[in-house]
Image (tube, grey):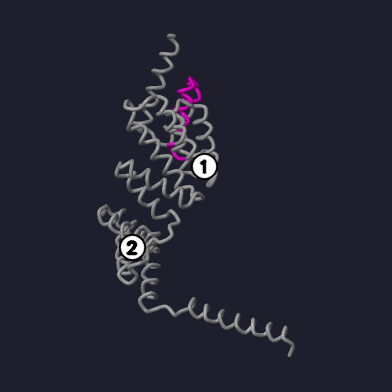
Amino acid sequence: MSVFLYRLSLILVLTAFFSGCSLRKSFQPMTSNQITSGEQNRAGSAAMERGDWELAEKKFEEAVKLSKKDAELRRHYAEALWVQGKHRESFEQLSEAAKWNAKSDGSLEISFAEKYLLMDDLQAAYQYADRAVRYNPKEFKAWALRGKATWYLAEQQVGSISVGELTKAFDQARNDYYRALSLSPNNRDVLPELAALQMRRNEPEYALATWQNLQDLYQPGSEPMIVLQGKADAYLAMNRFADAADCLLAAERRTPNDPNIVRKLQNLEAAKESNTKR
């Protein structure tokens, strides 16, 4: 055998040997605890999808006992606790998950941010949403959450910050919403938030376009009431009274005697009368 063929065969043998070692390490058999934990996790996830949060909590709790270092599993457990109003326990599980979350994809930070927003701890919500954006800039939820936290923080500081600072914060929030929609076009949760911000920025034309984009995602007559009311608000801000009335009357036909719609119709009549006197 030539020296070249000998070296080549030696390389192939060594490659096969070390590949086998790597495969043996990668494909170690699962322990009974891991198997049982996986079963409980799947049962918990199925219960979540059905809306059976009490059963989901029980299954995730059993799974966590068997897989204490599984950060994703603890996050699911935290969600089941949160929905049932067990907020302290939910945060405890998220904190435990953070200990074992070696390489975050932003999902844990998103969960923290969502909950801090609901608790009106806007600074903490912003910090976690900002981390989520840095950890996973392709996740639309991270951008939307940071946009909302930025907006609400600015609202909280109205009167204590300058108009320029307020405008800058609103601009950042708007840009975050735009980024979220670039990653998840036509998202039915983000579009209403963006429209509301655009109205807050005195941009009813843009808000109307956003509401129209959302309405186009539904079959005619099946759009949520918030769309009709949002369009009416935008039309009213633009003094397009007839268009605003059409939206509100369409909403009234679907939900007669709705006090919110009745109030908006009254405001519309008052605005029309005031505009006529000018």
Q: Report, in whole angstroms, how far the alpha carbon at label 2 lies from the one at label 1.
A: 34 Å
Other residues around mark 1 within 10 Å, as few (<14) / some (14–19) / many (≥20): many
Q: Residues within 10 Å of mark 2 (few under 14, many from 20)?
A: many
Tag 2 residue: 56
Q: Identify the amino acid type marked 1.
A: Arg
Q: Quadrant of residue 252?
A: top left
Tell me: residue 6, above or below residue 36.
below
- Residue stretch rendered in magenta on the structure: 222-245
Q: Is 49 located above or below residue 161 in the figure?
A: below
- Residue 5 appears at what percent x and percent y? 72, 85
**Residue most extreme to the bottom:** 1
Give above or below for 20 relative to 193: below
Q: Quadrant of residue 261?
A: top left
- Taking the image as shown, residue 221 lies to the left or right of residue 81, namely right
User: Residue sitting at 30 percent across and 70 percent down?
Assistant: 65
**226 magenta-colored:** yes
Using the rendered image of the protein, determine whether residue 103 is visible from the camera's viewpoint. Answer: yes
The earlier-in-sequence mark between 2 and 1 is 2
- Tell us which disc is closer to us: 2 or 1: 1
Q: Main secondary structure of the magenta part?
A: helix
Residue 131: percent from left, percent from top = 41, 49
Nearer to me, 198 or 21: 21
Question: What label does residue 179 carry, if any?
Answer: 1
